[in-house]
Amino acid sequence: MTGYDSDAFRSAYEAVWAKWPADREALSIPTPHGTARVNACGPRDAPPLLLLPGGGATSLTWYAQAGPLSAARRVYAADLPGAPGLSVPPPGRHPRTVADLTGWLDALLDGLGLAAADVGGHSYGAWIALHHALRAPGRVRRLFLLDPTQCFTGYRPGYVLRALPMLLRPTPGRVRAFLEWETGGTAPDPDWLRLQEAAAGFPAAKPVTGPRPAPDALRALEAPVLVLVAGRGKAHDPLRVTTGAEALLPHVTTAVLPGISHHALPQSAPPALAARLTGFLDARD
């Protein structure tokens, strides 16, 4: 028994959804891996920005950035297939490979009527976004990665050990304890934390994992990339992330965000984060 309560999850989801801008809109987009829930806001004729959450999180984790980013962008944030959220994968059709995930993103862009978009991801979502940019470079205009995992360096062993109990047998208490440890006393938003707790035991599919992107492929990426790393994060060594990105990506800007942890991004990020992201997206290279 997982103890998962779908009504509690939906209630927690709606509480965070209410934090999004007033023009928010819920979209249902058909894909080969089921119907994707996409949360949108911003002017319909503005340049599109697609956002992907980290592992175990929903698209709503972008609530603090949705308002500032949607001032000049049409923001689309997707719940990942087979992960916590309101996307509905058909039985036995969840993604199993990197190619499945990038194909899902292609179908998502097609369903939204977008030939290309700016793309941003956090953690595992950044890993997916980077793989998609490498496999479908014509569909990604600019790419920002917030504390990307498994892209330029591996996890710290201590982080993995701390996460194991929550991953092997997720309960609300274990989720809270892990997040409180990783955020180091920086109290997460209570509604967001309640949603994370409610997702414990969610009937999720096994996430797609794999190697880091190939160095030669990264060196050939022409899209401008912004890599922002959590200076107080415990998932990996911030310096290894920035130096790895700078060594491999030809058009990259990196920065370390002091005083912020991996799981505090992007919802509890410094106020300057939105300005930094908007400045990158507005740049003309």
Image (spheres, rainbow, N blue to C red):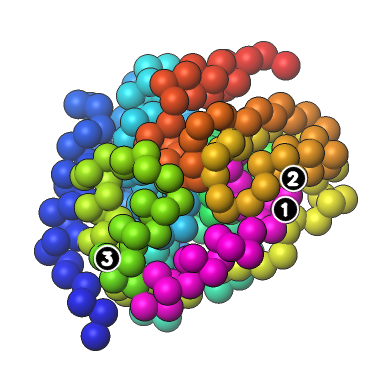
Q: Where residue 176 sits: x, y (%)? A: 31, 58
Q: Where residue 150 sits: x, y (%)? A: 66, 56
- The residue under label 1 is which amino acid type? Thr
**Lower sequence index among marks 1 and 3:** 1
* Secondary structure at numbered mark 2: helix
Q: Where residue 105 sits: x, y (%)? A: 52, 52
Q: Are marks 2 and 3 in contact (CB under 8 Å)?
A: no
Answer with left or right where residue 166 lies relative to residue 196: right
Viewport quadrant of the N terminus: bottom left
The residues bearing labels 2 and 3 have C-alpha atoms spaced at a distance of: 32 Å
Q: Residue at x 43, y 78 (%)?
A: 168
- The residue under label 3 is which amino acid type? Gly
Q: Nearer the viewer, residue 117 or 59?
A: 59
Q: Which residue is mark 3?
A: 173
* Secondary structure at numbered mark 3: helix
Is 17 part of what is drawn in magenta? Answer: no
Q: Which residue is mark 2?
A: 240
Disc assigned to residue 153: 1
Q: Is residue 183 above or below residue 42?
A: below
Toward which corner of the image does residue 199 lie, by quadrant? bottom left
Disc assigned to residue 131: none
Q: Are marks 1 and 2 in contact (CB under 8 Å)?
A: yes
The residues bearing labels 1 and 3 have C-alpha atoms spaced at a distance of: 29 Å
Q: Are marks 1 and 3 in contact (CB under 8 Å)?
A: no
Q: Residue at x 87, y 50 (%)?
A: 216
Answer with left or right where residue 179 lies relative to residue 153: left
**Would residue 187 be seen by someone viewing this image from the given angle?**
yes
Identify the magenta region.
143-169
**Lower sequence index among marks 2 and 3:** 3
